[in-house]
Each structure stands twice: as C-alpha cells, then as structure tokens.
Amino acid sequence: MITRGTRAVPILFGAVLALAACTGPADSTSSPPGSDAPASAAPGSEAPESASPSASAAAYEGPLEWWHLGYTPGGDTPTSQLVDDAVEAYEASHPGVDITVTGIPFSDEGLAQLDTSLATDEGPDIFRIASDRLPNYGEQGVLSPIDDFMTEDDQADILPNLLEGVEFNGELLAWPQWVPPVGFYLNNAIFEDAGVEIPDETWTVDEFKQIAQDLTSEGVFGFATYMGAASVNELTLLYAEGATVLSDDNGEYTLNSEAGAAGLQTLVDLFEASAMPPDSTTLPLADIDQGFIDGRFAMITGGSGGTAAFDAGGIEFTVLPPPIGAAGETVTVGGMGTYAVPAKSDAARVAAAHDLARYLTGEVINDVPGWFLAPATRQSIDVAAQNPLMQPFQDMLPAVRFMPLSPSWPEIDAYIHPEIQLAVAGQKSAQQALDDAGAQITPLLGE
Amino acid sequence: MTTTNMTNPPEGRIRRFWRQNGAGYLFVAPSLFFFGVFIFFPLAWSFLLSFQDFGFRGSEWIGLDNYISVLANPIFHQSVFNTVIYSVFTVGVWVLVAMVLATLIHPLPGRVRTFFRAAYYLPAVTSAVFIALVWKWMLNANPWGVFNYLLSLVGVESLGWVSDPSPFLGSSVALWSVILSSVLTIPAVGVVLYSAALANIPRELYEAAESEGAGAWQKFRFITVPLLKPVTLYVAIIYTIAAFEVFERVYVMTGGGPGYATHTIVYLIWRTAFRFTDYGAASAQAFLLFIVIATISVIQFRALRGEVEY
C-alpha cells in the first residue's frame, strides 16, 4: 500500500504538470474560489456594470463600508480620531447612511488584504489609497471611475495637473485628496552648532553637498535618506538633475540617462565622504525620522507627514524643496493620496460612496479642522492657513513630478532601489546600477 | 431473495465498517476538517494558482509560464544561492551546537540540568521578530553597535555588517552577518530533543567503554553520536526546513538588501505575493521551494537512516 501510494505521488504530480503545460485557450478564464464575480470581469475585459451617472446618492439609505489604512477603532491615534469625526459629521448630514470604518495595517500585508477584498463584490465601498496603485486596479477594472460623478464645480476646483495624476486609460480612477511632496528637513540646531547658514529654496545640489559635509561631525551625519522599496525619497536627487524613471508615454525606461547617473552620483559621493550614515543602504524610514529627532542626522528627506512628529518632538526645523540641479528649476517627487470606490452591482450604493469620497476630499475641511495632513488637491482648500507647517509643502506643489502611472509600478519600484543601494555601497558605478535596473524593468514595459 | 442478496451486502459492509471505525473517524473529524480548510484547501488552491496569471476578479490559465519565468529570473537564482549558503551553515552549526550543549548539560545535577534546559529553550518561546531586532542593533554599522564597539576595543575599524554587500567568502558580508546572528542564537528545540535522547542511552554502555579505557571523546564519538543518529536525522530535517524558510530575520534585519545580498526564497515569495500582487508567480516559487526542501529531506533521510539498537 505504502509503495503504491508513494509511486502514485510523482505520477499524479507529473500528470498535473503535463496538464498545466497545455495552455488553455485565451478565453479560458476562471474565477478564484470564493468569488462570485462573473466571467466578464476577467482581466482585460470590462468591469462589472458600474453605477449609472443618474444614480442619486441622496436617495441612498443603508450601510457604507470604509476601509482605512492605519485606522484603529476608538480614536486611539490622531488619524483615527479625525476619521471618527469625519464619519460623525457625514452621518449627521446624511441621515440613513451608516458608515462602518475598518482599519487595515499600513503595510504590504494590509494592501494585500485590500486587494483580496476587491476580488469580490463584498469588499469596501470606499478606501484611501496612494495614486501609484491605481493603474493596477484600473487595468483589472475593479474601480468605479469618478468621471460620471464629478460635478463642474469639482472639475474647476481640483488642480488640473493633479487630476492627471489619477488618469489611466482615459478614465479618472479616484478622487484626489492631497499631495505630500518630498521635501528636505533641516535641523536648525545642528546648522547653528556647525556655524552653517540655513540656505533658502534656491539652493543648488553643489551647495547641498558641501553643506552636508560641513555638518558632518562626531555622531552627526550631514544627510540621510531612505533607499528602500515603496518610497521615492532618494529619487529627488535624480529628478533634480532632470531624470525621470520612464518616458512621458511610459514606454521606455529613462532613469539610466546622464541626468539619472549624475543624481545617483551625488548620493554615492556623500556616502563615500562619510556624510551619510554607514548603514544608509538598509536604514528603515522610521529610523531616519528618529535620527533626525535625536540630532544624529542634520538633513533628511521626507513628506509632509513628518512635520507633526518633528514638531511634537520639540525640534526646530526648516523645510526646503530639493536643491536645484541640472534641471534648472526646483523639482521634487511625490505621490497622491486618493479615495477610490470599487465597482459594485448596487448602483445607488456606489453613487453614495462617490458622494462620501467627494466629501472626504473637500467639504470635510469645514467639519473636521486638521483633516488634511498634506497640501490639498483643491484650490478652494488652503491647508497652510490652518497649519502653517504645511506652507513649504504647499509651495512645492507646482514642482511635483509624480511617479509613472503604470500597472507595473510596484515591480519597477522594487527593481530600482536595490540597484541604488549597490551603487551607494560602492559595488557598482551609478551608471551600471541604473542600467542593471533597466534590464529588469524594460521587459515589464512591453507587457 | 436475489434482490436482497444484491443490495444488503454493501449496506452490511458499510454498517460493519462504521460500527468498527466510526468512533475513531468522529474523533479525528474536527482535526481533519480544520486540516482540510486551513491547510489542504489553501495548498491545493495555491498549486492551481501557480499555473495562472492572477487577477482580482478572475485568473487566466497560463500553464507553466510562471515556473518558466521564475526559473529564468536572476533574482530567483540569487535568492536560491543565498538560501542554500544560509541553510548549509546554519543547519550544520545548529545540529552540532545542540548536540554538544545537550551532551555537556546531561551529566549535570538534576536542578542545574533543568535550569540549563529551560534557559536554552528560551529562544524558542521568544518572538523571532524581537530576536531579529536585537541582532539588528547589535550588528549596527555605526560605531555604537555592540559588535563594532567590541572591534574598536581591539583597534579594528567598524564594519558595515548587515549593510555591507561587499563580497566575502563566496557570498556577501551582509549575508554572513545574518548567518552569524542565526548560529549564535541557541538552537533550543535541538538541545531539548538531544537531552531527551541522551537520557535513553543505557548507562551500561558508557561503563563498559570506561572499563575498556575509553576517554570522554571516544565515548562521545563511538557511543553518543551513533546512538543519537535518529534524533540527529529528525533535528537535521526540521532545521533544514526552518533554514530554507528563513524570512523574519531577513525582513527585520536587512529588508532583503543591500541590493539582493540577503534575498532568500521565502523573502522573494513574500515580495512577489504581497508587494507585486502576483500570487501566481509567488505560488510557483513556493512549490519550487517545496520541491527543493522535499528533495533535501529525502537525501538527508537516506544518508542518516539506519537501525539503532541499544
């Protein structure tokens, strides 16, 4: 018996492999177990019928499921308290709407949980997401585009270049909420101790390099930046030289241009000059922020979200846009926070979710002061008027370059950072590292 | 009568079988249910997924494409290489250290022996993430890292440890640093298993050897080691599986970097599944890992199996 069973295993395994080798016809799509999605919702095909433009959100009475990254029930964190306040205000003005907020971890696993839920018709009605993940959702047709739900007022209010940041295949996939550009945080005390004058926003890359080295002393490194995946912080110095990751049509990898190599060389030079910490290649984002608070790093890169923590830490700091390089003007990079609405069969519910999304990206400012933790995408909302710490970031908005809206962005991003780490560690030249990243990325662009 | 003869015997067999075995099956039914739902079903589904291009609302059957692309991916090759280097050294050291430690504490008085067993078992009940965090700070590349501080006491310059991808002994400084952190963590389960096995070795064998003039090393070499062979086989297999599945240590200490210096197979599976949302390719990687582990386990089993008689 045991012998027969043992022999049966490789036979069965071989049979499955042989069966697998026979690639099925192109239309042989299968729904994942547990999914009742119709076959028409397969990749490349159209999404389930979305809510009609005429559907009235005002008529909707019922539940709405809102998934929020990092939310914890009971207002345990400042962000959670803001969410609770927003829910309370919206429900007060929309009797009959019952919003349930579900927190998901702010991590890759949390995002995977969200992705899995989108495979069904039972997932969230609305969720907050960074714009760089939208193309993947758009390609799979799991979102309800906002085009039919935007009013003329919305279109006039949202900055046009920011609307482009949510456009994919001719559709606007989500409601833009805010833009946290990457800025340079300067620790005023370290500048003062070193006798170095704090520059203004016209500073150049050469000046930045010199300042970083001048600030470096016993226990203090002039500059630190995160080089890990799912972040674009260190790319600011490459973009400052005029580099971009992909060409305008997203069809060609361009980071290995002369400008890109020059930008990366700035990081390499600073690391070689010991103006950056020796563990720069593996330094986590949280450690960089903590190092800035502790006075170990004189200058760091970061989004507007850091202002609250640094301010609470009692740090006197200055925020500047990235230094000006060969691009000849201030250039920074950033993402965009958006609210997306999944496509569902219940048209009224989808319309109600869009109405909530519109509220959360605009009117909410009247009910929940402090809701915006980064510059808003609407011209009517002056976040800096409420929070002066946001002013430098708000001023950077015209200089923001978004990462390419490509469904392959997570892979592209993941191939860039390891090569940058290897260049900084001296294992490859800047040009070679960017070329090697391109060798991995270019095949993705043809998919 | 004929009809009755045609239908009754099967019913009789079923009833007889149920009467004889029903209670047993009822007892194991809950366990089988949970095994089916939480182990077998996900396993079977991920096996099917490995032949599909995963989509949120429908996946496309693509045959062996996932396996072909994974096997052609240089990052997968690097991850396999790193995992093999990590496993060979950690398993070898873990087995040896566990056996030696168990042998050293075995002759100790009862309470002292219990103390050491408990102390050595502590790592097994401590969060792996916590242990990795501690090691990360001990191996910090800055001068205030514990290891760099110790080096400074003897006049040696600071090392990059887990942040340094420089080539070293066929791999990288970063990977060897991760290996160092693993081998310096006491192999708790092995110590306990060897301790239990040592208690079962008849004392008379050692007494007979002593009467023949055997020293401590000879007793260890010719009595202890051979008689511990079954436990060694088991320990080697479970440690090999654990080593090939190393993840949290890499995730916490290096994030797979610098570059791809500490990418391991499971880290790559995690990255492919949860960062790229490519569950098909991740499943293919997982089943390739399964084949590697199964093959090595069979080889170990055949190399170390053998009858042991006391």
Image: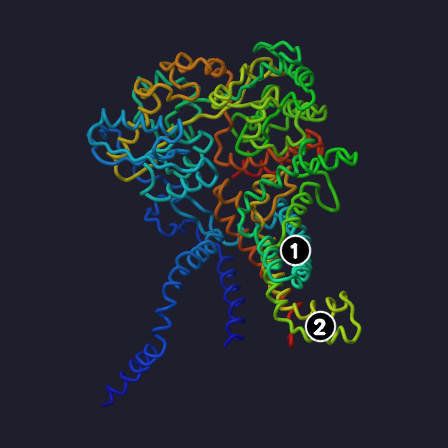
* SS class, disc 1: helix
Position of A121 with respect to A327 (left or right) is left
Q: To which residue does mark 2 refer?
A: B206
Q: Quadrant of the N terminus of chain B?
A: bottom left
Q: Is residue A185 above or below residue B39?
A: above
Dot 1, how many residues are within 10 Å of its Cα: few (below 14), some (14-19), or many (20+)? many
| Chain letter belonging to callout 2 | B
Position of B84 with respect to A293 (left or right) is right
Q: Closest to the observer: A51 or A178?
A: A178
Residue A281 x/y as whole percent: 64, 33
Residue type, mark 1 in image? Trp
Residue A157 x/y as whole percent: 35, 16
Q: Closest to the observer: B127 or B243?
A: B127
Q: Are marks 1 and 2 on the same chain?
A: yes
Q: Which comes before the other along the chain, label 1 or label 2?
A: 1
Residue type, mark 2 in image? Tyr
State the image quarter where residue A203 is shown: top right
Q: Residue, x 49% and y 33% (percent of image)?
A: A406
Residue A335 x/y as whole percent: 48, 26
Residue B11 x/y as whole percent: 29, 80
State the image quarter where residue B213 is shown: bottom right
Mark sitting on residue B306: none
Q: Quadrant of the C terminus of chain B?
A: bottom right
